[in-house]
Amino acid sequence: MRPPWAPQSRDEAELEALQTDVMRFLAILGLCLAAIFSLVQGAAQEQVIGQVDPVPAPAESAAAETQQLVTTAPPGRPATEQGFTLEFASVESLETLLRNERITLYANQGNQFWSVDSSGQVEVVDAPGSYYQMQAETVPGHLLERIGGIIPGAATIWGVSLPPEAVSKIEQLTSSRNGGSLLIGADAAVTLAGD
């Protein structure tokens, strides 16, 4: 056994350098795989937007429930072959409900939630018990800009909680049909497009 103060041979030094390089490579590979996994997981979540089926909530509360919500400015976007889409009848309907405090609009990054009112005022809040997830492009532009200045950088998940009567009507309509486009009006009434 060679004492620690004795000089290393050239072969031993090269072996130690090789081991260090392999360990660095594995660390970099691990970071790359973690980043790819995160991207794939985010893409999988984006693919389910538009379905009314519950999905796990990105919140600390185990009781929290997220459902998917698609909102559009013009109504009447065709429904998928099977399943439901849930849309505001118009941007004005969304803004009226928000202004009248019939709905609550949420922005979420990680486990942090903010509520956003119709004027763009932002307040940190606890994770809601349940909400419908929205596509970011369906949130009114002035609200997107406001939250972007307060919580820049990370991806924001948008959601909205609906009044109990709207949730009940959604459950009633989805239990009696196989699919369709559900519209939320300015009075929070939910109707099936085409009825």
Image (tube, rainbow, N blue to C red):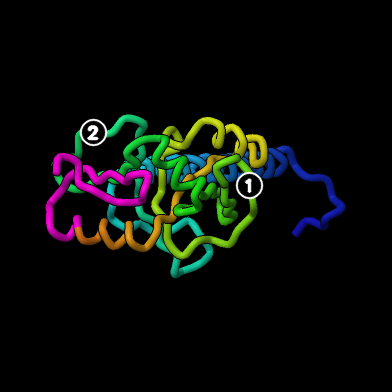
* Of 64 and 190, the residue lying toward us: 190
On screen, residue 146 versus residue 33, left or right, reads: right
Q: Position of residue 147 (x, y in %)?
A: 60, 39
Q: As displayed, is residue 170 above or below residue 136?
A: below
The quadrant of the picture occupied by the N terminus is bottom right
Q: Look at 82% across and 57% down and name the residue there.
A: 3
The residue segment tinted magenta is: 173-195
Q: As displayed, is residue 131 above or below residue 17?
A: below
Residue 73 location, quadrant:
top left
Q: Which residue is mark 1?
A: 122
Residue 33 visible within the image: yes
Q: CA distance from mark 2 to mark 1?
A: 31 Å
Q: Which residue is mark 2?
A: 76
| The stretch drawn in magenta includes residue 142 | no
Give amino acid for label 1. Answer: Val
* Of 3 and 120, the residue lying toward us: 120
Q: As displayed, is residue 6 above or below residue 73?
A: below
Q: Look at 32% across and 46% down and name the residue there.
A: 184
Q: Position of residue 19 (x, y in %)?
A: 63, 44
The number of numbered discs placed on residues in the rendered structure image is: 2
Q: Position of residue 20 (x, y in %)?
A: 66, 43
On screen, residue 84 versus residue 94, left or right, reads: left
